[in-house]
Image: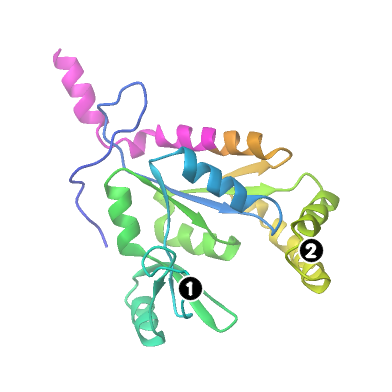
Amino acid sequence: MTLSLSHPARDGSEAPGIARRGLMLVLSSPSGAGKSTIARALLTRDPQLSMSVSVTTRPPRPGEIDGLDYIFVDGATFQAMRTAGELLEHATVFGNSYGSPRGPVEQVLTAGRDVLFDVDWQGTQQLRQNARADLVSVFILPPSRGELERRLRARAQDPEEVVCRRMAKAADEMSHWAEYDYIVVNHDVGKAVEAVSAILDAERLRRERRVGLAEYVERISRG
């Protein structure tokens, strides 16, 4: 699905008159590496960044709002969206299907704003296949395996068998680090947030995303 560039946002650089196309920022990490904390901090500090709202076949949980937390659909609707190519990525987890709808993301990108995705390496592969030019992928690593386990236990959210299962899965997840554009080691969450923010700022200045550059250069050339 391709929409026309009608009212693109400004890129926030030293030349605010230049329109740009938004980007898709993907954060991936093993559980406990700090990805969710970094994502929340980025969303709080950056008004040009919004979270991708996934479509899912699972029923709403208490307090969840349709269209805000998830877009809730039945299985037939999900399958129809998948068949029609309306999902940028999709997966099935514990019998429920999840996916990132293409249309809303494209609208945000066209408006010059950015979309944050919290997906694993398999979801990132699908996004790369379907929208490589818009994708910026960041993998968050823990400073050590011991620190990763300490953080998982410090959360006190999971029973022992779940912690062990997450640790066993972490090695496989981290083996895909080389498939990402950037790697951030989360020694300190504040510094990790700053690092990802710097990546976001730099990627916003890429020439190919600044779709208004030709018009801007022509305008200043004429004086």
99 vs 205: above or below: below
Instruction: Please state the horizontal and vertical placement of residue 154, each as a whole percent of the image.
Output: 79, 55
Q: Position of residue 138 (x, y in %)?
A: 58, 47
Who comes first in sequence, dot 1 or dot 2?
1
Does residue 1 sit above or below 55 in this rendering?
above
- Answer left or right for 203 relative to 184: left
Label 1: which residue?
98
Dot 2: few (<14), some (14–19), or many (≥20) neighbours within 10 Å?
some
Give, as a three-letter code, the residue at label 1. Tyr
Instruction: Determine which of the numbered discs, if any, sits on residue 48 in the image.
Output: none
**Residue 31 at what x, y percent from top left?**
69, 59
Residue extending furthest toward the top? 223
In depth, the one of 172 and 108 nearer the eye is 108
Residue at position x 20%, y 43% in the image: 7
Residue 208 at x, y percent in the picture: 35, 38
Residue plotted at (47% across, 57% down): 128
Q: Label 2 is placed on what type of residue?
A: Met
- Magenta extent: 197-223
Q: Looking at the rendering, in which quadrant would you find the C terminus? A: top left
Asked which quadrant contains residue 186, the reply is top right
Residue occupied by mark 2: 167
Q: Nearer the viewer, residue 106 or 197?
A: 197
